[in-house]
Amino acid sequence: MAATVPAPGTSPTDILAAADGALYKAKERGRNRVETAPPG
């Protein structure tokens, strides 16, 4: 897992939602994956 500094005004809920989406995308696509959430 990694993180970057969010854009000003990004809520913690938005950050967690993006991380959660990337997690489930990686799980869906198989093992040993790296997925990213789109910026913004």
Image (cartoon, grey):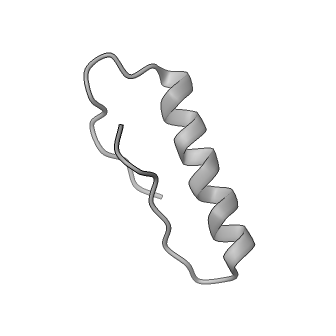
In this picture, residue 16 sits left or right of residue 36? right
Eyeballing the image, is 1 above or below 33?
above
- The quadrant holding residue 5 is top left
- Vertical side of 6 occupied by 22: above or below: below
The residue at the point 57 percent across, 56 percent down is 22
Which of the image's four quarters has the C terminus? top left
Q: Position of residue 33 (x, y in %)?
A: 55, 78
Q: Residue at x 56, y 35 (%)?
A: 16
Q: Is residue 5 left or right of residue 20?
A: left
**Side of 3 where 25 appears, left or right:** right
* Vertical comparison of 25 with 33: above or below: above
| Lateral position of residue 5 relative to residue 28, left or right | left
How many numbered tags mark residues here?
0
Q: What residue sits 40% from the left and 55% below the top?
A: 2
Q: Position of residue 4 (x, y in %)?
A: 30, 44
Residue at position x 59%, y 83% in the image: 32
